Amino acid sequence: MDTLLLVTLLLPLVGGVVVATLPGDRQLLAKQLTLGVSLVVLVLTLVMAVGFDTSGERFQFVSSYTWIADFGVRFSLGVDGIAVVLIALIGVLVPVVVAASWNDQPTGERSMKAFFAWLLVLETMMIGVFAATDVFLFYVFFEVMLVPMYFLIGSFGGPRRQYAAVKFFLYSLLGGLIMLASVIGLYVVSNSQLGQGTFAFDMLRQLEITPGTQKLLFLGFFIAFAIKAPLVPFHTWLPDAGAEAPIGGAVLLVGVLDKVGTFGFLRYCLPLFPDASRFFAPLALTLSVVGIFYGALLAMGQSDMKRLLAYTSIAHFGFIGLGIFAFTSQAGTGAVLYMVNHGISTGALFLIVGILINRGGSRLIGDYGGMARITPLLGGAFLIAGLSSLALPGTNSFVSEFLVLIGSFTTQPAFSIIATVGIILAALYILLMYQRTMHGPENPRLRRARDLDKRELAVLGPLVALIIVLGVYPKPVLDIITPAVEATMIDLGATDPAPTVAEEGTR
Amino acid sequence: MIQAPSVSYTGISPILFVFGAALVGVLVEAFVPRAHRWGVQLAVALSGALGALVSVALVAGREELTLARAVAVDGPALFLEGTLALLGVLTILLLAERSPDMGGSAFVAQAAVPAGTALDRQLATQARTQTEVFPLASFALGGMMLFTAANNLLVMFVALEVLSLPLYMLAGLARRRRLLSQEAALKYFLLGAFTSAFFLYGLALLYGYAGTVDLRGIFDQAAGTDKSDALFVIGLAMLIVGLLFKAGVAPFHTWTPDVYQGAPTSVTAFMAACTKVAAFGAILRVLYVGFGNSDWTWRPVLYGVAIITLIVGSVLALTQTDVKRMLAYSSIAHAGFILTGTIANSEAGLSSTMFYLLTYGLTTIGSFAVVTLVRDADGEASHLSQWAGLAKRSPLVAGVFALFLLALAGIPLTSGFTGKFVVFRAALDAGAGPLVVVALLASAVAAFFYVRVIVLMYFSEPAADGPTVAVPGMLTTVSLAIAAAATVLLGVAPGAVLELANQAAQFVG
């Protein structure tokens, strides 16, 4: 049994407990310890990503321990291609977030030590959600993940943090409880079919579930993941949570936690309930495409930068949803790559907005202007991250968006044509925000704003580099993702439509 | 010559321990000098409850009917007696708390003195402790154990009275806010006496139907087809009303918020945890043993009652501003969850209900123990607004209370989640899918008011003249530590206890 995944999972938790128990005046030691632990976890996740055999088993680094025998629950971990790239994303984002929050001063006399402790606990929960191959264990991590994020938003967030934290917690909890009904339903079905109730994903994949039951169970999972993703109309928690969360928390909320929803679609909804997925695909596609436009239009109208970015996430997740429910391996691969790229580019955007707010003290776009002249490095980073968000060719998001649209055009031409129009809106909301803050007349208050210092360069540098590198050479990541998506499509029973060849004689 | 029935003293030894402690407690009250009374009473009560716990462990596995089939010694009886003994130990520790930080004793020294008189004010300043609470609590505990083990409806009724009467008195013994406490006691007594009468009348009708009060006898008679079902159904209905009142199930729940709020908090912990265990133990035995094959009568009714209870408990708690009242409504909601398991009418339903009762009891005692710690100059600060910003001043206490609230909400990795999981699994297996969905939605609604308290404690600024957290005495600390440890342990590694509940899920008789 491979213990690499278990170590990667538990190390942040142990680190978080140690940081929490440090004496209150050792703030610097707490930060250094957090950074150290997160860098070690980064190395471990990269080892896993590099060591992932793209032509090997579907699930690698597998380990399994008995947990609650009476429930048929095992503490089973394992990653397929989709999970390993998302875990690598977590490994990259958490040290970046730690470095970005290094000098944060919380409101009141709250201790930043608690912030970093909760960050590490959150990291364990996030890795656990992607690494679990036992549905019960997945559910446990899915729910417990809410607690650290809730405390991060509620203790260290903006003025309306209490409202945002409670709304986030209760909305996600409601989704989780609806999913619990499906989880227990799966157990009951497996009990009657396999003679022994189980939660192991590999065994549940082999169940033959009647269509009616399949639809009910699918809906339970679907609602929970639609709330998490979020898909319109279950999205109302994200703008508030994204706006009020501290920047580090917002990066992880949008960069990782939301991916749990779409990951859940790919990992649990599609393989376990293929017929129900096909039945509900039009609904999911409609909600996704509506989300693309709704998120984009509302983003354009925002004057609060953080809220704007939260709405852009809703728009991006519409594309991911489109890619997943188009049921082709190309679109699925594009969707997974989109998840990784969105984490990088929107994460970078949130960090840049965080630096802007640090300089200017306000979240409103109107309070900034001409920053590109005052802080050229910041302006440059903002431009690159913004172009990545609108999927300019040459940036990482272009590859993923292109794959999604091409892949879904073959099976769902109407939806993909409508979605393509959304690209224009993406350009609008990003470039409008960029133009208003970075160009135009300067705000006299900010004439002496400092440009990026070394710490901020270290925070943004890796992300900007990844944007460009993955835009030019996404092959390593795609090689890892593609087999896993193809395996999911096989579970679903979907075959890619054969490409049509132009007839001879066509000019 | 009347033949004396055979008595399996080993089988009923847990009950005998507790009743023995109660009787010795009465004698102690009469003969031991006042100065030593508290220590002796505590020792006697604790040894009774601990002795019961140990004897449950030693007697485990026995299956028999004793005292002329009146008392059962079987898996569920022993499991619930053990649960009651454990919860009894924790609450006796809470009842005995006398630390000066916590206002001396929580009980009025002389309950017969009218509230508001000069003598009453004089008493409030004195340091006399009320030690009659110990034998009263032991009698109540013994009655509860007998209630869950009674195989005969008459013995069950006697046990019901033995467990209720001390509780009526205990509810009225608060040292502070005496009028509220006396109102709670009176309300409990009147409503309780009324529903005991329902129970008795239902018992009489069932006797009229079956010719016997033995549960197995009723079961056998119910199989016959040449009798009028009206007596049977009405008798069962009135019996269930009596039992559901004790369990605090809607629509017989109206006493719960007032009584829980008025009673001294340690007594509330006792009532909330132990009475519910006892009541559901009796409900399980009556319904599964006596009416197991007639579930066409009680299952649909309990289905509807569970839904009403879940909705009432979750929704009405949303508007509460007093912590004790909020916890009271939450216990009503939990009674709804427990009913969800009971409806399953299967071995899984039995074991899951018993497991849930254990986890719920431990978490509830823990939450009320924390409530005793938050005090201001007037005594306990139970208004929610006074709890704002508690985490700043006492992070440990706030953390422990947050743990209990998350467990009550059913967050994974706490005992509340494993309890809910087994109960819902049993219900789904038995085909009560819609009920499980309602229960899950009620959990989501209930999570709101639990989370609201956590928000208040952690994310709000404390009031300038807010309450302080008393330094808990040794007894409360032990009780809290055990409850918190069990809440986490049963959430992370519940395998052993689940196995125990599964093995114990076989009724005798």
Image (cartoon, helix red, strand yellow):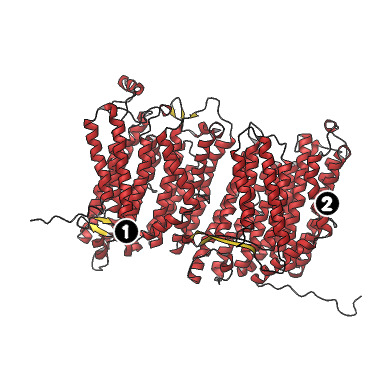
Q: Residue furthest bottom?
A: A504
Please name which of the two marks, 1 or 2, marks the residue nearer to the observer. 1
To which residue does mark 2 refer? A387
Question: In the displayed structure, does residue B303 sit left or right of residue A101?
Answer: left
Image location (x, y in percent) of residue B318: 50, 42
Q: Viewer-proximal residue, A454 or A315? A: A454
The N terminus of chain B: image quadrant: bottom left
Q: Is residue B191 above or below residue B352?
A: above
Marking on residue B187: none
Quadrant location of the C terminus of chain B?
bottom left
Pointer 2 indicates a residue of which chain? A
Residue plotted at (55% across, 36% down)? B456
Q: Mark 1 to mark 2: distance in Å?
A: 71 Å
Report the disc number at residue B61. Answer: 1
Callout 2: helix, strand or loop? helix
Where residue A407 sits: x, y (%)?
76, 67
Judge whether B462 appears above or below B271 on screen: above
Q: At which x and y percent is residue B385?
A: 52, 32
